[in-house]
Image (cartoon, helix red, strand yellow):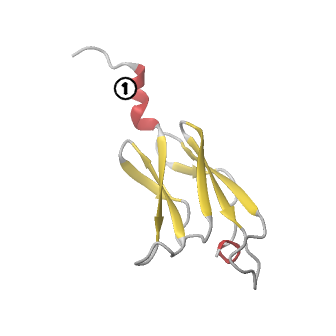
């Protein structure tokens, strides 16, 4: 067996994301699930968010964007907040404050 090429060695360190919804229908609060090397390493929140999206920043960093809501808002956001998540090689790190649940739901 020959040496492991850099592309093969680093493949498992790339942070990936998938979206999911809570409850029995897709209309429930959404979460971002983070994976690396085929293993789940965490979620963005424990309680979900009404409006959530994510974009890749680097191979080990993903930015999650949350729609922000005020009391009595209809299903239209009052702004957004961007939160960066990074894979350190051993754990998922949150680099920015996550907006409170009351603003995300």
Residue 80 location (% of width, % of height): 74, 61
Residue lying furthest bottom = 72
Residue 6 location (% of width, % of height): 42, 21
Residue neighbourhood size for the residue with mark 1, other residues' Cα within 10 Å, grouped as few (<14), some (14–19), many (≥20) = few
Q: Is residue 9 above or below residue 88?
A: above
State which quarter of the image contains the N terminus.
top left
SS at mark 1 in the image: helix
Residue drawn 60% across and 47% down?
Answer: 55
Apparent side of residue 72 relative to residue 63 in the rendered image (left or right): right
The residue labelled by disc 1 is: 8
Residue 58 location (% of width, % of height): 59, 36
Q: Nearer the viewer, residue 61 or 22?
A: 22
Q: Is residue 21 above or below residue 102?
A: above
Q: Is residue 98 visible?
A: no
Q: Is residue 15 above or below residue 96?
A: above
Apparent side of residue 83 relative to residue 33 in the rendered image (left or right): right
Q: Is residue 45 visible?
A: yes
Q: Is residue 76 above or below residue 86?
A: below
Residue drawn 68% across and 76% down?
Answer: 75
Residue drawn 37% across and 18% down?
Answer: 5
């Amino acid at each position: 067996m020959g040496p492991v090429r850099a592309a093969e060695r680093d493949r498992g360190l790339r942070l990936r994301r998938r979206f999911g919804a809570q409850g029995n229908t897709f209309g429930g609060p959404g979460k971002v699930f983070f994976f690396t090397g085929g293993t789940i390493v965490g979620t963005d929140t424990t309680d979900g968010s009404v409006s959530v999206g994510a974009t890749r920043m680097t191979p080990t960093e993903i930015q999650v964007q949350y729609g922000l809501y005020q009391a009595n808002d209809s299903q239209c956001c009052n702004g957004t907040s961007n939160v960066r998540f990074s894979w350190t090689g051993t754990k998922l790190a949150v680099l920015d404050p996550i907006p409170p649940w009351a603003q995300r739901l």
